Image: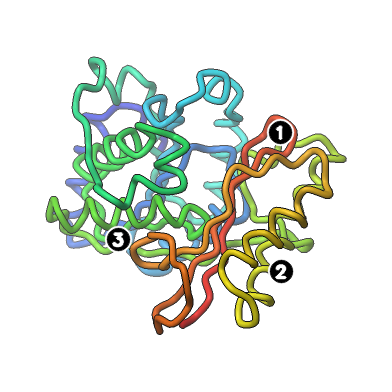
Amino acid sequence: MQIISSAAAIKQQTEQIRSSGKTIGLVPTMGALHEGHLQLLRTAAQENSVAVCSIFVNPTQFNNAEDFKLYPRLLEADAQLLKENNCQVLFAPAVAEMYTEALQLKFDFGALETVMEGQFRPGHFTGVAAVVSKLFHLIKPHKAYFGQKDLQQFAIINRLVTDLSFDLELVCHPIVREPDGLAMSSRNRRLAPDEREVATHLYKALQLAAQTLPHQSVPEVKTAVINYLAQYEPIRLEYFEIADALTLQPVSNLQSKRNTALCIAAYVGEVRLIDNLVIAG
């Protein structure tokens, strides 16, 4: 496995791969890899000639400086995992390599970024769109792989690819969960043992909502979720939203035949976690 830290070098390497007629599958990550990332990588390796993984903790998508500081950085261990899971190229640049000067560009994704993560993390999706655009320009993948756990992020990137005519296919991989249901996340590493146990109630709350939604109104289901999570003191609910799975706009009833997304964000102790469950229409 090649490890590349230079933007110029990754561009040159991937241009050589493309010119030889091979296809590139890209898995963009911020490191602290877990089984969810590895499933993305293995899929990329199966569907393309070359699997490329990027590891870059992107400062422009963090609203909280302390969160950025504490985000796990495990490059050596991550590189070993990638080598064992068919990654041929690892791109791990420094901040100065990706941002030669302060980011000035602002993205506006309209209603898509005014809800949920966009509402509670203003400017977050500008940072996401900026770094993903840079990766797409440098690496020029044929396919790029993202996890469903970041459902709103995937919708944002899909809009970015459509509006800016990036020549690639996006792949959304289902959420990978621990045996107890907790969605795999790099942030789970920061949970204390008691917090880790309590965190499983986020998925249980989504399951509760999915079970009761056919029989109760949207406001009643929201109240049920709020009351359920209120039993667990370490959990501080930021939002629970019932939304159209495509537009991510809130829905007031379920008369539509389109898929519905149950989306949640909460702090467990000092660690912010997100999760979702998509229900077929």
Specify the amino acid type for callout 1: Arg
- Snapshot colouring: rainbow
Location of residue 140 in the rendering, given as x and y in whole percent from the top left corner: 21, 49
Residue 143 — which label? 3
Location of residue 218 in the rendering, given as x and y in whole percent from the top left corner: 56, 68
Residue at 20 percent of width and 22 percent of height: 104
Mark 3 vs mark 2: which is more N-terminal? 3
Specify the amino acid type for callout 3: Lys
Location of residue 84 in the rendering, given as x and y in whole percent from the top left corner: 58, 51
Q: Secondary structure at mark 1?
A: helix
Vertical comparison of 51 with 75: above or below: below
Location of residue 102 in the rendering, given as x and y in whole percent from the top left corner: 26, 16
* Badge 3 vs badge 2, beta-carbon distance below 8 Å: no
Q: Which residue is mark 1?
A: 190
Vertical comparison of 181 with 132: above or below: below
Is 92 left or right of 270, judged from the image as shown? Answer: left
Q: Which residue is mark 2?
A: 208
Neighbourhood count class around disc 2 (C-alpha, 10 Å): few under 14, some 14–19, many 20 upward: some
Neighbourhood count class around disc 3 (C-alpha, 10 Å): few under 14, some 14–19, many 20 upward: many
Q: Secondary structure at mark 3?
A: strand
Q: What separation in Å lies between label 3 and label 1 (alpha carbons)? A: 31 Å
Quadrant of the rendered image containing residue 203:
bottom right
Mark 1 vs mark 2: which is more N-terminal? 1
Observer-nearest residue: 19 or 205? Answer: 205
Vertical comparison of 183 with 134: above or below: below
Residue at 46 percent of width and 51 percent of height: 87
